[in-house]
C-alpha cells in the first residue's frame, strides 16, 4: 500500500511539474498574472507530492518491506535505522528521488524569496525549473522507479554496501546534490534573463546569492566525500581523481568561475555573455556528472550499451538542455553589449584571469576524465589516466591563480591608482616569502621547489586575505566596518590559502609504510612509535571484527591509543577496513590493518600525514566565506525601483 | 580599455591559455596513459618493456603464497586461457581473494613475473572491473580454451 501511494504521488508530482513548466509561459505570453501565479502553486504542489513519495520510500525502508525491489537490494533487517534512512539515497533510484526532492525544494525557496524580482521574471524561472523537474520525474517513472515491486518478496534483504554504512556517507550525497541541483537555479535565472530580454545587471544581482548558496553546499559536499574516502576506504588518500570525484569537481570549478564572473556583471555590466555561458555550462556539468555517475558509462562504454535506456534518456535530456540553452543564447547574443570599459590594472582584469584559469582547469579535468571513454569508443583500447597527470594538469592553472588571487582581491574596479597595490601588499609579500621558506625547513627539515612555491603561495594568500579584516578591526572598533560581502570574500580566500598549505605539506611530507606487526611489536614512523598491545574479536550489529589496540608514543611518552578494525559484514561477507586515526591540528597518524600473515602477525599500514586536516578545514572556511557573502545585506533589501 | 580591446584581450588570453594547456595535455597524456593488457598477450610477450601497464583477471585458486610474517605475496592471475605469476609487497585490498577479479599496476620483472606496485579489487563482490570482464569473456569458450591451442599460445617467449 505505502509503495503504491509513493508511486501515485510521483505521478501527481509529474502532472504538477507539467503545470509548473507550461502555464507560466502561457501566462507571460498572454500577460495574464493568474496564469503566472499558477506556476508558483504548482511548485508548492509538486514539492508536497515529491515529499510524500520520499516519505513513503523511507517508510518502506524503516519497515523493511522487501517486496519493494529497491529496498530488498539495499537494506537488511539488522541494518541500524540511521542507515536504513540513508540507504534511501544509497543507490540509483533513490538518489534520483532525492535529486527531484531537492530540485523542488530549491524551486520553493525561489518562489518564497523572490518577492523583489518582477513577477514575469520569476514566472520564467519557475517554469524552467518545472521543465527540468519534468525531465527527472519522467526519467524516474519510465526507467528507474524506486517503488517497483519484487515477487515473491525475499525474507531478508541483500544489505547496504558496507562502505556506505557510515555517518559521513549518510550526509555526503544530500550535501552534494543540494549543490549540484542548486546550480539549476542559476541556470533558470540565465534562461529567464534571455527569454525575458532582461539582460542588464539586475539578473546577475538576483542570481548571485542563489549561485553562492549552491556553491557552499557543493563545497561542503565535496569536502565530506573526500574526508569519507580518507577514513572509510581505508588507505589514507584524500583525492583520487576518480571519474566520480571529477564529476562533482567540474561543476565546482565552473561554479567558482561563475560566482566571480557574476560579480563583474552585477557591478560593472561587463562579461555578460561569458556569465550566461558559465551559468549554462555549470549546470550542464552538473547534469553531465549525474549522467557519468548514473548511466554506468564510467564502468565501461560497454556497460552503457548493455542497459542503454537510462543512459540514452539522460544523454537526450542533456542534449535538449544544452542545445536549447545555446540556441537561445545565440539568438540573444547581439543584445549583449558591454556598458563600459576598464584599464589593464583593475579588478576586472584579475577576475578575467581568474575565469580563464578556472575554465582551463575545468577543461583539463574534463579531458582527463573523458579521454578513456573516447579512446575506448574509437579503437577499443583500454587506457587509464593516472593521478600524476591530473596533479600536473591541475597545478598548471592553479598555482598562478593562487598568486594572482592575493593581488586581485585588493584591486579596485575600473582602474587601479598607480603604486597603491605595491604599498598595500609589501607586508604580506614579505611575510609569505619568510614564512613560506621557514615553515618547510624548520618543521619538516626539507626543501623542494614545489614545496616552497606551495607554502609561499599558501602563506601569501592567508596574509593577503587577512589584510582588510585586520585593518577594519584595528581602525573602527564598534562601527559597522567592512561590508559582510568583503568579509565573505576575505574569509573564502583565506580558506584557499589554508587548503593550499594543507595540500602542499601533506603531498611533500607524507610518510607511509606497510609493515608486519604482531602483539608486543613496535613500528617507528616519522618519530612516532606504534606498539600493538593486543588483538581481539569484537561484534557489531551486523558485522564481526578483529580489532587491534595500538599505543602511540613520542620520545617514550604515551600520546594516544588507536583501535583499527578489520570487519566482516555478515550478509554480504565482505571484509572492510576501519582505520584508526589519531588527529591533531597539525597531523594525522593513521593505522590500518591489512591481512593476517599467519602466526598472529598482521600487515599494517601506518601513515604520518602533516596538515591533512587543513585541506578540509580550508574547504569549510571557503564555505563559511560563501555564507557571509550570500547573506550580505544588499541581497536582503527589496529593490526600490 | 575600450570594450573592443577588452574583448581582444579576453580572446587572446583564452586562446593562449588553451593552446598552452592543449600542448601540455597532449604531452602529459603520452607519459601517463596506462594501457590494460590481457594476460594472454602479456604471456605471449606483447607488452611495453619500458613502462608500467595494467593487467587483470581472476586470482587462481590455491595460488596465493606468502612467506610467514613477510609482506611479500605471490599469486597467479589468469584470464582462463593463460596464467601470469604476480609478485607484490604490501597491504592487499579487502576484497582480494582467490577466485575473485583483480587489477594490478606494474611492469614485467625477471622470470616472466609481473611485479605489481598496486593491486586493486573492487569493494563489491558482484562487481568486476570492466577490463577484467571483457578479458575473461574473450577467452572463455573461444579457441583459446582448447587445450592444445592454450598450451601453444601460453608458452612463454
Image (cartoon, coloured by chain):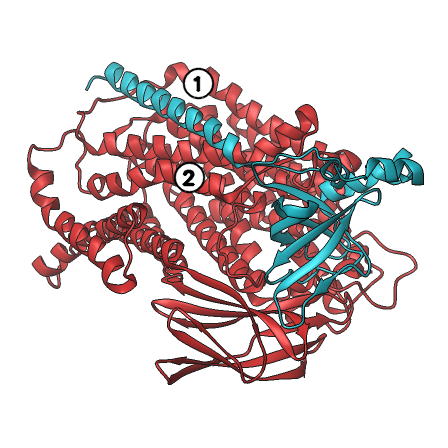
Chain colours: A red, B cyan
Residue A420 badge: none
Coordinates of residue B57 in the picture (x, y in percent): 75, 47
Residue located 87% across and 68% down the image: A155
Tell me if I can see residue A582 in this picture. yes
Eyeballing the image, is A197 above or below B117?
A: above
How far apart are the two marked residues, 2 and 1, measured between alpha carbons?
38 Å
Please tell me whether mark 1 sits on a helix, a strand or a loop. Answer: helix
Residue A392 badge: 2
Residue A332 badge: 1
The one of A313 and A615 positioned closer to us in this rendering: A615
The one of A510 and A114 positioned closer to us in this rendering: A510
Eyeballing the image, is A9 above or below A395?
A: below
Q: Quadrant of the C terminus of chain A?
A: top left
Eyeballing the image, is A290 above or below A516?
A: above
The one of A40 and A464 positioned closer to us in this rendering: A464
Coordinates of residue A613 in the picture (x, y in percent): 39, 63
Residue located 52% across and 19% down the image: A327
Residue located 9% across and 40% down the image: A422
Q: Quadrant of the N terminus of chain A?
A: bottom right
Please tell me whether mark 2 sits on a helix, a strand or a loop. Answer: helix
For residue A192, side relative to residue A6 (left or right): left
Give the mark count.
2
Coordinates of residue A220 in the picture (x, y in percent): 45, 55
Tell me if I can see residue A48 in this picture. no
Q: Quadrant of residue A618?
A: bottom left
- Mark 2 or mark 1: name the one nearer the start of the chain: 1
For residue A440, side relative to residue A142 (left or right): left
For residue A345, side relative to residue A509 (left or right): left
Chain of the residue under label 1:
A
Amino acid at each position: 500500500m505505502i509503495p503504491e501511494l509513493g508511486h501515485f504521488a510521483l505521478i501527481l508530482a509529474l502532472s504538477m511539474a507539467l503545470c509548473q513548466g507550461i502555464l507560466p509561459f502561457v501566462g507571460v505570453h498572454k500577460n495574464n498574472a493568474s496564469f503566472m501565479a499558477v506556476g508558483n502553486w504548482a511548485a508548492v504542489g509538486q514539492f508536497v507530492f515529491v515529499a510524500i513519495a520520499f516519505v513513503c520510500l523511507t517508510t518502506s525502508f524503516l519497515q523493511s518491506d522487501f517486496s519493494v525491489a529497491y529496498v530488498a537490494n539495499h537494506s537488511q533487517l539488522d541494518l541500524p535505522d540511521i542507515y536504513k534512512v540513508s540507504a534511501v539515497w544509497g543507490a540509483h533510484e533513490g538518489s534520483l528521488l532525492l535529486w527531484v526532492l531537492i530540485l523542488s525544494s530549491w524551486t520553493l525557496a525561489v518562489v518564497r524569496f523572490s518577492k523583489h524580482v518582477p513577477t514575469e521574471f520569476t514566472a520564467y524561472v519557475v517554469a524552467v525549473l518545472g521543465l527540468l523537474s519534468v525531465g527527472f520525474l519522467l526519467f524516474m517513472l519510465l526507467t528507474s522507479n524506486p517503488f517497483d515491486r519484487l515477487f515473491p518478496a525475499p525474507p531478508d534483504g541483500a544489505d547496504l554496501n558496507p562502505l556506505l554504512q557510515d555517518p559521513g556517507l549518510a550526509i555526503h550525497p544530500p550535501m552534494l546534490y543540494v549543490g549540484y541541483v542548486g546550480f539549476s537555479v542559476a541556470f533558470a535565472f540565465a534562461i529567464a534573463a534571455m527569454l525575458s530580454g532582461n539582460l542588464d545587471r539586475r539578473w546577475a544581482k538576483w542570481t548571485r546569492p542563489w549561485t553562492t548558496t549552491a556553491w557552499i553546499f557543493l563545497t561542503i559536499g565535496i569536502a565530506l566525500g573526500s574526508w569519507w574516502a580518507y577514513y572509510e576506504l581505508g588507505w589514507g588518500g584524500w583525492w583520487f581523481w576518480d571519474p566520480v570525484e571529477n564529476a562533482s569537481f567540474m561543476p565546482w570549478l565552473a561554479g567558482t568561475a561563475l560566482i566571480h564572473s557574476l560579480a563583474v556583471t552585477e557591478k560593472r555590466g561587463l562579461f555578460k555573455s561569458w556569465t550566461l555561458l558559465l551559468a549554462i555550462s555549470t549546470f550542464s556539468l552538473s547534469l553531465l556528472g549525474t549522467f557519468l555517475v548514473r548511466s554506468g558509462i564510467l564502468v565501461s562504454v560497454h556497460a552503457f550499451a548493455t542497459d542503454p535506456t537510462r543512459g540514452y534518456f539522460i544523454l537526450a535530456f542533456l542534449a535538449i538542455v544544452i542545445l536549447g540553452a545555446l540556441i537561445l543564447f545565440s539568438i540573444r547574443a547581439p543584445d549583449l553589449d558591454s556598458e563600459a570599459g576598464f584599464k589593464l590594472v583593475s579588478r576586472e582584469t584579475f577576475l578575467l584571469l581568474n575565469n580563464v584559469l578556472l575554465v582551463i582547469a575545468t577543461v583539463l579535468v574534463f579531458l582527463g576524465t573523458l579521454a578513456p571513454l573516447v579512446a575506448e569508443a574509437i579503437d577499443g583500447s583500454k587506457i587509464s589516466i593516472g593521478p600524476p597527470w591530473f596533479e600536473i594538469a591541475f597545478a598548471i592553472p592553479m598555482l598562478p591563480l593562487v598568486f594572482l588571487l592575493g593581488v586581485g582581491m585588493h584591486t579596485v574596479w575600473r582602474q587601479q591608482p598607480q603604486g597603491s597595490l605595491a604599498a598595500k601588499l609589501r607586508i604580506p609579500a614579505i611575510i609569505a616569502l619568510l614564512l613560506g621558506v621557514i615553515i618547510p625547513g624548520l618543521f619538516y627539515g626539507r626543501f623542494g621547489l614545489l614545496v616552497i612555491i606551495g607554502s609561499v603561495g599558501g602563506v601569501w594568500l592567508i596574509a593577503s586575505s587577512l589584510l582588510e579584516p585586520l585593518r577594519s578591526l584595528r581602525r573602527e572598533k564598534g562601527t559597522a566596518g567592512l561590508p559582510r560581502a568583503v568579509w565573505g570574500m576575505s574569509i573564502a580566500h583565506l580558506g584557499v590559502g589554508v587548503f593550499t598549505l594543507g595540500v602542499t605539506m601533506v603531498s611533500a611530507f607524507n610518510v607511509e609504510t606497510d609493515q608486519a606487526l604482531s602483539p608486543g611489536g613496535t613500528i617507528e614512523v616519522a618519530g612516532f612509535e606504534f606498539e600493538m598491545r593486543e588483538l581481539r574479536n569484537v561484534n557489531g550489529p551486523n558485522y564481526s571484527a578483529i580489532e587491534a589496540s595500538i599505543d602511540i608514543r613520542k620520545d617514550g611518552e604515551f600520546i594516544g591509543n588507536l583501535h583499527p578494525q578489520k570487519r566482516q559484514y555478515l550478509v554480504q561477507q565482505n571484509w572492510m577496513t576501519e582505520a584508526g586515526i589519531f588527529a591533531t591540528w597539525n597531523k594525522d597518524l593513521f593505522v590500518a590493518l591489512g591481512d593476517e600473515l599467519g602466526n598472529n602477525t598482521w600487515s599494517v599500514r601506518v601513515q604520518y600525514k602533516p596538515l591533512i586536516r587543513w585541506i578540509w578545514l580550508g574547504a569549510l572556511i571557503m564555505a563559511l566565506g560563501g555564507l557571509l557573502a550570500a547573506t550580505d545585506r544588499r541581497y536582503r533589501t527589496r529593490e526600490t525601483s | 580599455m575600450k570594450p573592443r580591446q577588452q574583448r581582444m584581450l579576453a580572446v587572446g588570453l583564452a586562446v593562449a591559455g588553451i593552446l598552452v594547456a592543449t600542448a601540455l595535455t597532449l604531452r602529459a597524456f603520452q607519459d601517463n596513459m596506462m594501457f590494460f593488457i590481457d594476460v594472454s598477450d602479456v604471456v605471449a610477450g606483447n607488452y611495453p618493456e619500458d613502462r608500467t601497464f595494467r593487467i587483470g583477471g581472476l586470482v587462481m585458486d590455491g595460488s596465493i603464497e606468502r612467506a610467514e610474517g613477510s609482506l611479500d605475496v605471490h599469486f597467479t592471475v589468469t584470464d582462463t586461457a593463460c596464467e601470469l605469476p604476480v609478485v607484490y609487497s604490501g597491504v592487499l585490498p579487502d576484497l582480494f581473494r582467490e577466485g575473485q577479479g583483480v587489477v594490478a599496476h606494474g611492469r614485467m620483472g625477471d622470470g616472466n613475473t609481473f611485479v605489481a606496485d598496486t593491486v586493486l579489487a573492487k569493494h563489491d563482490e558482484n562487481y568486476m572491473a570492466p577490463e577484467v570482464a571483457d578479458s575473461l569473456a574473450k577467452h572463455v569458450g573461444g579457441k583459446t580454451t582448447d587445450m592444445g591451442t592454450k598450451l601453444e599460445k601460453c608458452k612463454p617467449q
